[in-house]
Image (cartoon, helix red, strand yellow):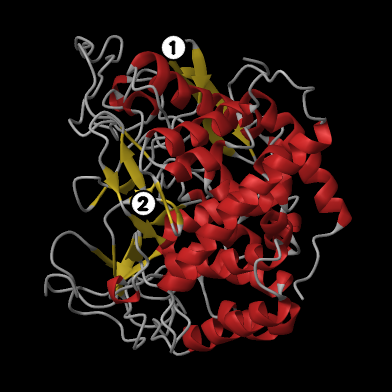
Amino acid sequence: MARLVSARRLAGAALLAVALVAPLTPAASAAPPSDRDLATQERGRQLSLARDTWKSFTAMVAPGTGLPADNIKGDLDPTSRSGYTSPTNIGSYLWSAVVAEDFGIIDRRELVARTKKTLDSIGGLERHPASGQFYNWYDPATLAKLRVWPEDGSTVHPFLSSVDNAWMAAALMVVRNAVPEVRAQAQRLLDPMDFAFYYDPAGRSPDVAAGLMRGGFWDEQPPGCSLVGNYPGHGPDVWYTCHTYGNFASEVRIISYVAISLGQVPPEHYFVPWRTFPDTCDWGWQEQKPAGEFVDYLGIPVFEGQYTYRGLKFVPTWGGDMFEELMPDLFVPEVKWGKDSWARQHPVYVRGQIEHGLNDARYGYWGFSPSSNPDGGYREYGVDIMGLDTPGYTSDQERTSVDVGFAGCRDAQPPPAAYGDGVVTPHAVVLALPYQPQAALTELAKLRKDFDSYGPGGFYDAIAVRSGKVAKRYLALDQGMIMGALGNLLGHDLLRDAFTKGGAERNLRPVMAMEEFNLPAHQ
């Protein structure tokens, strides 16, 4: 029998569900349902979504290895599994299994069996010997490192991605605490992972006392731009990406969270990536001129800048999307540990996405994040003006962008006369549930009612809201964000509690508590 959710978690979920459900409850001639009835109804809807989402994972998993494919078609036909997977996809499956067991979707015996099988296969994957890092693409059925892309036969130059490895490490950190039956096995897989291999001590400037993370490296010379080096100084040289990750309000902060938690980089590194870039013309290429000033934390000068969109003040992500803003928050309790930073940021950022979808672009829907393209393939989507990058991630198929200029450095361009076929993705809305619960529940109900957007594995990946086209497939990453968000929402911080035990609490929490974003306490 499945393990019952604790009374503490049930109580927390019920209290939250009461707050969530009210705006979705229509007026009725009969006596209105009680708060307890509403809480039960709403919890049931979200558990049903989790149950269906989990079905997509069971369909994606290769039976012989326990590794999930990157994606599967909307009918969950096993023959439509992709022939490739990544460390992020594997991690998404592992933490989703923890959520599924907590919700009673699978029992404890099945959780242990599934995680053990997956960990056994992870142990059989080829790694970079000196760093213990995983390559970016494997065949989920054979465990082979990919050198040929299965969909078109093109050459794959094996790459080791810092952010993808961080999601894998985050999953192993969750599993070692949430599934003690396989703790030792998870720890053995985690121990060799050395994130200092990506850490450039002079990444921002030789004058700054801590560095930045590289995007990754190749262990064979690739075509195009690369930098030969070896930051920790063990093993042969590698070919690093020419870029470092220089902005902080992005999914790539999970690399910092993992590396600081594991004690592999100094805690001061937390303050090195830019919140916004500075307000001088040297940085005049960024989306808009920020308002802010430099503040010193542990000897690191931090430009505490803010952007403004339709009266809302916020710290921009790179592209203006929900995945960058909220996926790391699935593992680190950013609002709790960053009371003067992330607690001010997340609710306002979500409001900006809502404002764009409903009142600026006037799509009637919102929730913009990289996802499947309803016209085929995969694409980045976001709210252009809410990202640092000037071209930005746009919210429609026509790539309608905005350029408000940079006072004294770059002239503004005329605003768009109209937006085109906006594309929303349900995972972005589920991520927003803790921060704008009434709006998010309303949006999920509208998406399910107005479009053919729901299948046997839960919400399909993306919807073009004006044409009505739906990307009828499931992606392990996006399904993992849905499972993770629901796990924390209804499981009372299930994944955050498992991730933060140990090094995160000791090493990461103190630096997060120091910072104050240049944002109003109330907006």
Q: Position of residue 423 (x, y in %)?
A: 31, 35
Mark closer to the chain start, 2 or 1: 2
SS assignment at label 1: loop
In-image side of 506 versus 48 (left or right): right
Q: Look at 49% across and 24% down and name the residue there.
A: 305
Neighbor class of circle 2 (other Cα within 10 Å; few <14, some 14-19, many 20+) is some
Q: Which image quarter holds the C terminus?
A: top right
Circle 1 residue: 310
Q: Look at 56% across and 24% down and name the residue there.
A: 348
Give the CA distance from mark 2 to mark 1: 31 Å
Circle 2 residue: 244
Q: Look at 68% across and 83% down and name the residue there.
A: 182
In-image side of 165 versus 153 (left or right): right
Tag 1: amino acid: Arg
Q: Which image quarter holds the N terminus?
A: bottom right
Nearest to the observer: residue 408 or residue 127: 127
Q: Position of residue 183 (x, y in %)?
A: 70, 80
Q: Look at 26% across and 20% down and name the residue there.
A: 402
SS assignment at label 2: strand
In the picture shown, does residue 289 fall above or below 129?
above
In-image side of 141 versus 156 (left or right): right
| Residue 276, image quadrant | top left
Nearest to the observer: residue 461 or residue 297: 461
Q: Position of residue 194 (x, y in %)?
A: 51, 72
